[in-house]
Amino acid sequence: MADNQANLYLVAYDIANPKRLGRVHRVLKRAGLPVQYSVFTVVMKRKVLLRLLEDLTELIHPAQDDIRCYRLPNNTDMKTLGRQLFPADVMLFTDGINRLLSD
């Protein structure tokens, strides 16, 4: 994976304290798009992602909180069921990584 190439990541979190939860949510809201409660997608280069994760590390209590980040493959086939937070035809990102949440 090249450091200068933007990739799609899924970031999920479980934060025990409401104040920390709000801080983590605000940081991720500036960086990506909420997919579900406590789940975001972000498109960014690896160096920017590592900086984001460092910022999040400073906001959490490691013994009580959990943040996970998964790189999604470029050819991910995604399907959704049930109520969505935004219309089905909304593109997540268009920086060379086009994704529709549903067909």
Image (cartoon, grey):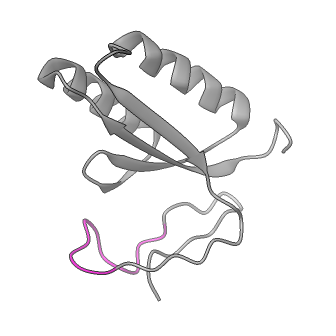
Is the residue 98 above or below the residue 72 in the image?
below
Decide whether residue 86 is among the magenta residues: yes
Q: List x then y, in percent, for residue 8.
A: 61, 53
Q: List x then y, in percent, for residue 71.
A: 63, 49
Is 22 positioned to the left or the right of 9 in the image? left
x 24%, y 79%: residue: 82
Is the residue 9 above or below the residue 84 in the image?
above
- Comparing 36 with 68, the one in front is 68
Q: Give the prevailing secondary structure in the magenta stretch.
A: loop
Image quarter of the N terminus: top right
Residue furthest to the right in view is: 2
x 42%, y 10%: residue: 58
Q: Quadrant of residue 65?
A: top left
Q: Which residues are magenta?
A: 81-91
Is 90 positioned to the left or the right of 94 in the image? left
Q: List x then y, in percent, for residue 13.
A: 35, 37
Q: Quadrant of residue 54?
A: top right
Is 64 positioned to the left or the right of 92 in the image? left
